[in-house]
Amino acid sequence: MSFVAALLPVAIYIFVVYKLDKFSLLSVRRLLLLVLCGMGTALACYGIFWLTDPLLPERASELLDPIVEEAVKALPLLILARHKKIVFFIDSVICGAAVGGGFSILENIFYLLMSEGMSMGTVLFRGLEVALIHMGCSAIIAAGLMFAVRLAERRRARLDIKTKDCLMAAFLLVAAPALHVFHNSFHFNPLIQYIFVFGSMAGLLVWTYTYDGDMIHRWLDKGLDKQVSLLRSINEGHLGETKTGSFLVSVKESFPPEVFFDIICFVQLHVSLSVAAKSRFMMREAGIDLPLDDAQKEQYLSQYKEYNTLEKTLGQSARMTIAPVVKFYPADRKALEDLLAECR
């Protein structure tokens, strides 16, 4: 019964966080794999502490152990971020919470095995607090990694990077370990400590959600407007009316007519798919769930197939020339993947 009581808060937390995923971004299979990854990080930390704790003073361990835990838990989240699997705020919360939940499950089991005579109330309260600190900190770190990947993509594309975006990513990656260190180093009334931790986590996540919403609207509003204008100029034959179109016109003489025609077709397909994917994302965000008809599904799949074919047939010189125009950012790629999954 004690084991059930220790694991129950973690299961509740994970269930609640998973239910926040109204876009179905994360499958149950991936969620369980992330929980298992979290348990694996707990085992790794147990081995590290078994080696290092005898060598360090107790005070040093209190300060360093939480930082090591957050660094180890961040490894699977970093892999997901690098592979563009953490793109939006809700992605980071779900993935981070799943890893942190797996970690706290194993940690609670360790404490139960090593401690005797713990009351049911203590088991429940400790399970609740441990789950909160691990899941909350991992979610915040995942959000920081998400922002860092976005900034890296913008830098590679030679786009403007705002200082406040860099500061936000750095702050999130530092704030989570700092909160964990505070939790482990300063002990006072358990209820007050829990309320403080809960309030801090909730405040950080709400702030991150608001900030992420602002970044998403910048991505949708500005990016979508530019793409719609470019698509209209291509369809109407007035390519030079936009900055991107003027750039394409300027490189026209560098390629044979048939290659330039393929380049325009490739750009047109890229923009069409990107606009469609963003439009579907905006509809889901607004709570509008209108299913695609068979003709629309066939059209998008056909466009994507033609897009891939042209990408393979265009020469390296042509692909390098138009790379800044047809760049898929992580958010774009995620939106396109969701559109294709819906069509299939």
Image: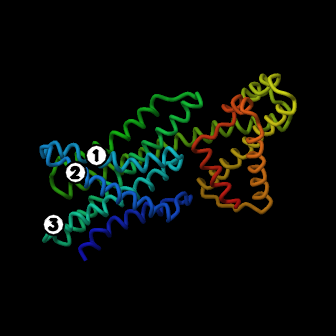
Name the residue beneath numbered marker 3.
Answer: 115
Check disc 2: other Cα within 10 Å, few if <14, some if 14-19, many if 20+: some
The residue sitting at 87% across, 33% down in the picture is 258
Pointer 3 with pointer 2, Cβ within 8 A: no
**In 3D space, how far apart are the residues under numbered discs 3 and 2 (Cα atoms)?**
18 Å
In depth, the one of 119 and 103 nearer the eye is: 103
* Label ID, residue 211: none
Q: Secondary structure at mark 3?
A: loop
Residue 56, percent from left and from top: 15, 43
The residue sitting at 39% across, 56% down in the picture is 99
**In 3D space, how far apart are the residues under numbered discs 3 and 1 (Cα atoms)?**
23 Å
Name the residue beneath numbered marker 2.
Answer: 49
Give the answer, above or below, for where 309 lies relative to 326. Answer: below
The N terminus appears in which quarter of the rendering? bottom left
Q: Earlier in the sequence, mark 3 or mark 1?
A: 1
Residue 332 placement, left or right of 162: right
Q: Quadrant of residue 289?
A: bottom right
Q: Amino acid at mark 1?
A: Val
Q: Secondary structure at mark 1?
A: helix
* Label ID, residue 68: 1
| Mark closer to the observer (2, 1) | 2
Q: Earlier in the sequence, mark 3 or mark 2?
A: 2
Q: Amino acid at mark 3?
A: Ser
Residue 112, percent from left and from top: 21, 67
Check disc 3: other Cα within 10 Å, few if <14, some if 14-19, many if 20+: few
Residue 163, percent from left and from top: 46, 28
Q: Quadrant of residue 156?
A: top right
In depth, the one of 276 and 315 nearer the eye is: 315
* Residue at the bottom extreme, as displayed: 1
The C terminus appears in which quarter of the rendering? bottom right
